[in-house]
Image (spheres, rainbow, N blue to C red):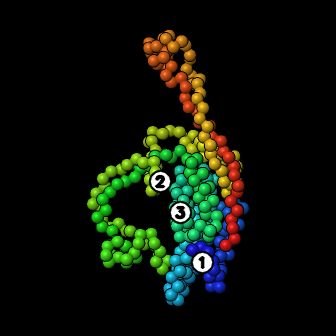
């Protein structure tokens, strides 16, 4: 749908947005992450006018395409905001922005055929690479019983016989969303590794590590000064290492820690640990395409 939006370039507002996207891409390529949401703010009134024009002229395709294009600008702005937060070492906050970026990129992909996705598949590749640098592996996910919900478009009970809308589909530039109006009960909070929404991260309250320690891998990666839009993959090499703090004695001797047990039944069992060595493989850089 992105390409179809740009094909309406005889509409002045579409041409203006086209230029805006072009300059935003230049800004990203130059790693200028200042005022990350400037283009989103500037384009908002233009998108409104385009949608109005589409409705008045009965062109649903344009109404929907402008919505996808607005999400595209949104994604480019979120990317700026993400790298800005990394530069400021706001690691915790950057995780949420990263999730916003992933949501937008998936969303645009959903409405755009593969050949017209521009650099979005590469952006997804980049974002999942960054995601793997964070220490977050377990997330909280709530389970609840929803008893009432409404369609965001017609306001009728969602997916009842009265509501013809399909969840997640676009109608005249609006997405059909299920608005929950009544929850009967919260049943549980589950700890999962693959939730729909990864913004609920699990952290230990007595974790006293510094930011640099907690986000060691991400921090080390950023210290390499790798260009923001350089694709990479992380290879983990596992090696068995001997713990330097344990003194080795014969297996059947008394353990040097003073427990009175045999070495083989005490500290001898913790003699080795698995060391994870991360190797960064650099790949090509994302080149933003002209619309
Ligand atoms: Zn509906
Ligand atoms: Zn011992």
Q: Residue at x 62, y 45 (%)?
A: 234
- Which residue matches tag 1? 4
Identify the secondary structure beneath mark 2: loop
Contact flag, marks 3 and 1 (Cβ < 8 Å): no
Say if 76 sits above or below 214 in the image. Answer: below
Q: Nearer the viewer, residue 257 or 34?
A: 257
Q: Pick out the residue farthest to the top.
A: 253
Q: Is residue 227 left or right of residue 161?
A: right
Which quadrant does the C terminus fall into? Answer: bottom right
**Along the polypeptide, which appears first: circle 3 or circle 1?**
1
Q: Residue at x 46, y 51 (%)?
A: 194
Which labelled disc corresponds to residue 106? 3
Q: Nearer the viewer, residue 210 or 118?
A: 118
Say if 49 sits above or below 267 in the image. Answer: below
- Which residue matches tag 2? 198
Q: Nearer the viewer, residue 127 or 41?
A: 127
Q: Is residue 18 left or right of residue 106?
A: right
């Amino acid at each position: 749908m992105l390409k179809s939006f740009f094909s309406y370039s005889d509409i002045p507002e579409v041409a203006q947005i086209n230029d805006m996207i072009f300059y935003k891409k230049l800004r990203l390529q130059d790693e200028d992450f200042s005022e990350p949401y400037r283009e989103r703010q500037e384009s908002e009134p233009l998108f409104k006018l385009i949608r109005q024009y589409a409705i008045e002229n009965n062109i649903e395709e344009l109404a929907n395409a402008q919505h996808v294009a607005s999400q595209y600008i949104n994604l480019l702005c979120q990317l700026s905001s993400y790298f800005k937060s990394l530069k400021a070492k706001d690691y915790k906050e950057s995780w949420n922005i990263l999730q916003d970026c992933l949501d937008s990129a998936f969303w645009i992909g959903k409405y755009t055929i593969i050949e017209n996705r521009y650099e979005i598949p590469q952006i997804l590749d980049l974002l999942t690479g960054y995601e793997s640098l964070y220490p977050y592996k377990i997330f909280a996910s709530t389970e609840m019983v929803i008893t009432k919900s409404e369609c965001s478009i017609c306001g009728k009970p969602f997916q009842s016989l009265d509501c013809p809308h399909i969840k997640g589909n676009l109608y005249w530039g609006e997405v059909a969303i299920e608005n929950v109006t009544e929850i009967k009960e919260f049943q549980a909070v589950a700890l999962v590794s693959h939730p729909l929404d990864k913004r609920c991260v699990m952290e230990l309250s007595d974790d006293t590590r510094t930011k640099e320690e907690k986000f060691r891998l991400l921090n080390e990666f950023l210290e390499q000064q790798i260009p923001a839009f350089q694709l990479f993959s992380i290879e983990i090499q596992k090696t068995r290492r001997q713990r330097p703090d344990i003194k080795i004695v014969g297996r059947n001797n008394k353990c040097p820690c003073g427990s009175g047990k045999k070495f083989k039944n005490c500290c001898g069992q913790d003699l080795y640990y698995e060391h994870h060595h991360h190797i960064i493989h650099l790949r090509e850089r994302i080149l933003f395409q002209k619309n």
